[in-house]
Amino acid sequence: MATNQVYTVAYRRKREGKTDYKKRMKLLLGSKPRLVVRKSNKNITVQIIEFHPTGDKVIAHASSAELTKLGWKGHSANTSAAYLVGMILAKKAKKVTCVLDLGQYTSVKASVLYALAKGAQDGGLDLNCSKEIVPDEKRLSGEHVSSYAKIIKADKARFEKQFSKYLKAGLDPEKLPEHFKQIKAKIGAQ
């Protein structure tokens, strides 16, 4: 029998590293819906979630899988795709005031997560996100990928290895900014 102090077992989701309850409580005290962003290696998912005592309610949902339905041929988890997914969500949710919830992700300036937030802002969501922390327009449109493709195009083997998925999908990586503008126009037209 134990004779030392009483030990309290933490909640399962806290032990697994899935939920930071102090951070969640601060977000809930604001009583605004949360823009919840989740990223994997291949996809990005975003939801607007409203707190209810009986359980959270999802107001709107968008993922990078919806981009392929619109004709997106690029990688579905990069900066450009994140921006477009944010715009899709904003079109679905109409005008909602919400707060950004990054979950367990570390806040990194100009990251994919903030690209999504910028897309949601540009799509019409009222989201408080500083201009200094979001990526610039060139990065959002994929011009950094295009310029890198131009640099390594001379080495054909390296170019084909680096951009094999783009080439397999039928997209020249140098034309990514034009492709981005086409998909953005489709989203805006919906």
Image: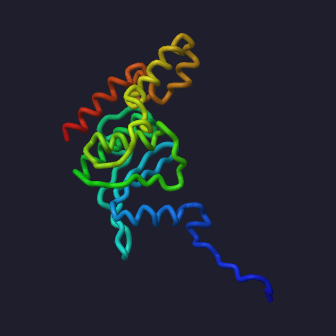
* Residue at 61%, 73% in the rendered image: 10
Say if 88 sits above or below 172 in the image: below
Determine whether, in the image, residue 61 is placed left or right of residue 150.
left
1 or 173, which is in the foreground? 1
Q: How is the image coloured?
A: rainbow
* Residue at 53%, 50% in the rendered image: 105
* Residue at 52%, 65% in the rendered image: 22
Quadrant where the image shows the C terminus = top left
Residue 115, position in %: x, y? 41, 39
Determine whether, in the image, residue 124 is placed left or right of residue 45.
left
74 or 101, which is in the foreground? 101
Quadrant where the image shows the N terminus = bottom right
Residue 5, position in %: x, y? 74, 82
Determine whether, in the image, residue 20 is placed left or right of residue 130.
right
* Residue at 47%, 63% in the rendered image: 24
Residue 182, position in %: x, y? 28, 29
Q: Residue furthest bottom?
A: 1
Q: Residue furthest top?
A: 154
